Image (cartoon, grey):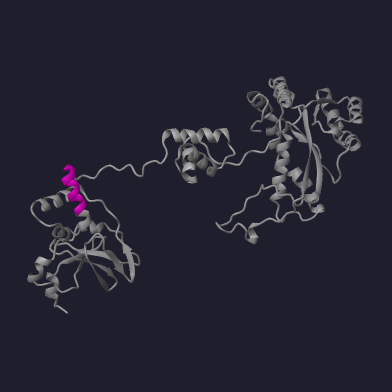
Amino acid sequence: MPDRSALQAHPVLQDFSGKQYPSMRPMRNSLEGNYHTHLEEEYANYRKPPDGARIVCHNDGSVREGYIRNGGKEVRLFTSALKAFQCNNRIVMAQRKHLADFLRGRIIGRLECGRTQLEVSEELGIAQSVISRLWQRFQDDGNVSRCYSTGRPRVTTPNEDRYLAVTAKRNRRSTASDLSRQLSSATGTTVSRQTVYRRLGHIGLYARRPVRCVPLTATHCRLRLAWSREHALWTLQQWSCVMFSDESRFSLQSDSRRTFIWRAPGTRYHQENTIERHCYGGAGWLVWGGIILGSRTDLYVQSVTITGHIYRDVILEQHVRLFRGAMGAEFLFMDDNARPHRANIVDECLQSEDITRMDCPAYSPDLNPIEHVWDMLGRRIAARQPPPTCLPELRRALLDEWCNIPQDQIDNLILSMPRRCKACIASSGRHTPY
């Protein structure tokens, strides 16, 4: 162990935090001084090794070796860009760095002075292959500055990108693999599925699930357009007198996919991340309800299909007739075109009770706001903890959640009727976002 005076004369080691440490290695004699060269300062910019290791270097400009200090252990580090940092039996590769223009000039200057590539490599701590390529480039065009790189060339041309876009728009059900094969057969250019995704994403085309809607014929579109034009200018006062009614079915085993779960990748089929259900849907209840601005009817729940007699004796007599008596002659009753609703006994009951029926175009759930109320009711049933497991529990849950739906949400749906009519007119009677 050298004495303290000898340690004072040794070069100083410096870490990334700026702290200086005296070197613990004996200083080489003057005969070996020619062997050492300068440790380039770019090695001070290398990534800090893990586990508390610190990269240190001499700061006197006379030696070319440094160390990695990890606690009381020092590992010798040479300055070649292709060497690795070894610390605690772990290899941490050096980050690749581009040579600065000043350093490139130093290399060319030494080579022009007659130095060999190996000598310059050992002196500056740069791989000989890097120096060889730099010298070859200088001899070819006289330039050593780093060229601008645009990255990997695009596989497809602009015309091929347009071909992908046109093909995808013509057949929107084509998969990315189909589009790749069509491009290869048409132009001879082979691309991957990810390339197809990127090219279509640049023009705003993304793979999404299609929206499920009822089928519409030309007659349906014409009737929907005529109905929307007739009621597009209705005021909110007129819409406040309309009762919207409909039926819906809720089953125990139906998978409405309204709820989401939190799961990690690769755990899709774990027991806690699955929902068991029968393909046929299972047993359930058929419900009927009516909504009006500021109020709603009681929810009627039964297990059998509603017939014309049930519709007259229960729905009209026990629910609709009460609202007609409270609102007067301005009251309008809107239902769909189901067969039980158009039975002769139902028409006779409406005439006897002086209830005005508001016609609704066929296949138009988007023009009846109660459809959104059924969706709200289904979400509330699916979110119940614990969920209903038998028909009596499902019946109680339906009645409870029907009463718990906020009235302001129902009113907002009814007040959206003018916007629904405008959307139907804008789409020429086709499907609307509602």
In the rendered structure, the answer to whether residue 48 lies left or right of residue 344 reads: left
- The quarter of the rendered structure image containing the C terminus is top right
- Position of residue 41 measured from the top left corner of the image (x, y, whole percent): 20, 57
Residue 77 magenta-drawn? no
At horizontal 85% and vertical 32% (from top left) the residue drawn is: 341
At horizontal 79% and vertical 31% (from top left) the residue drawn is: 336
In the rendered structure, the answer to whether residue 410 lies left or right of residue 247 reads: left
In the rendered structure, the answer to whether residue 367 lies left or right of residue 16 reads: right
Residue 32 quadrant = bottom left
Q: How many marks?
A: 0
Q: Viewer-proximal residue, 350 or 84?
A: 84
**Res 407 visible:** no
At horizontal 74% and vertical 33% (from top left) the residue drawn is: 294
Q: Which residue extends farthest bottom?
A: 1
Q: Which residues are magenta?
A: 132-143
- Position of residue 90 measured from the top left corner of the image (x, y, whole percent): 34, 68
- Position of residue 183 measured from the top left corner of the image (x, y, whole percent): 49, 39
- The quarter of the rendered structure image containing the N terminus is bottom left
In the rendered structure, the answer to whether residue 384 lies left or right of residue 129 reads: right
Residue 91 vertical placement versus 310 (above, below): below
